[in-house]
Amino acid sequence: MNTKLLITMLTALVLTSPLSHAESADKKSERVHYKCHLRLDDNSEVVHQFVSVGETKAEFQKSLPGSTLYTENGEDALIETVYHCVTKKQRFKTKQAIELEANTPF
């Protein structure tokens, strides 16, 4: 009886392992849409949308300073400061970010 139980448990473990691995791989490749309140190298502040793959919000935010952002007039600017990022469906908490978002055509 113990042998049957052991074989059943091992079979279940082998069958579910690839599934759990596939789920974790899907999480790592999941696309997350963010909108971020930024200060650029010309001291202007903007709200810009981004897509991140396989990074936490903190990792993504940390990677932004020094990156190039293409502005609506076709020029590029460097991101100097990231005030904060939220997912696309979340609402900003600061009045300035809310106003910038309202004036930004997405």
Image: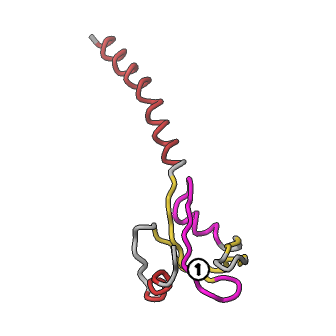
Q: Nearer the viewer, residue 101 or 84?
A: 101
Residue projecting furthest to the left: 1
Above or below: residue 24 compared with residue 1:
below
Point out the stretch of residues depicted in magenta. 40-64
Q: Which residue lies at the image location 40% right of the left edge and 70% below the top edge?
A: 90
Q: Which residue lies at the image location 39% right of the left edge and 19% below the top edge?
A: 11
Q: Measuring from the top left, give residue 71's x and y in whole percent.
A: 66, 77
Above or below: residue 6 compared with residue 85:
above
- Secondary structure of the residue carrying numbered label 1: strand
Q: Nearer the viewer, residue 20 or 51?
A: 51
Q: Nearer the viewer, residue 30 or 63?
A: 30
Q: Which quadrant of the structure image shows residue 60?
A: bottom right
Above or below: residue 16 compared with residue 76:
above
Does 57 appear in magenta? yes
Badge 1 density bin: few <14, some 14–19, many ≥20, Cα 10 Å: many
Q: At label 1, which amino acid type do we have?
A: Leu
Q: Measuring from the top left, give residue 20's x and y in whole percent.
A: 44, 36
Quarter of the picture containing the N terminus is top left
Q: Going by the image, does 90 lie left or right of 64?
A: left
Q: Which residue lies at the image location 49% right of the left edge and 84% below the top edge?
A: 103
Q: Which residue lies at the image location 50% right of the left edge and 67% below the top edge?
A: 34
Q: Measuring from the top left, give residue 28's x and y in whole percent.
A: 53, 48
Q: Going by the image, does 44 lie left or right of 31?
A: right
Q: Which quadrant of the structure image shows residue 37?
A: bottom right
Q: How many marks?
A: 1
Does 54 appear in magenta? yes
Q: By what rule are the colours in the image chosen?
A: secondary structure
Q: Measuring from the top left, give residue 85's x and y in whole percent.
A: 51, 72
Report the residue marked by disc 1.
38
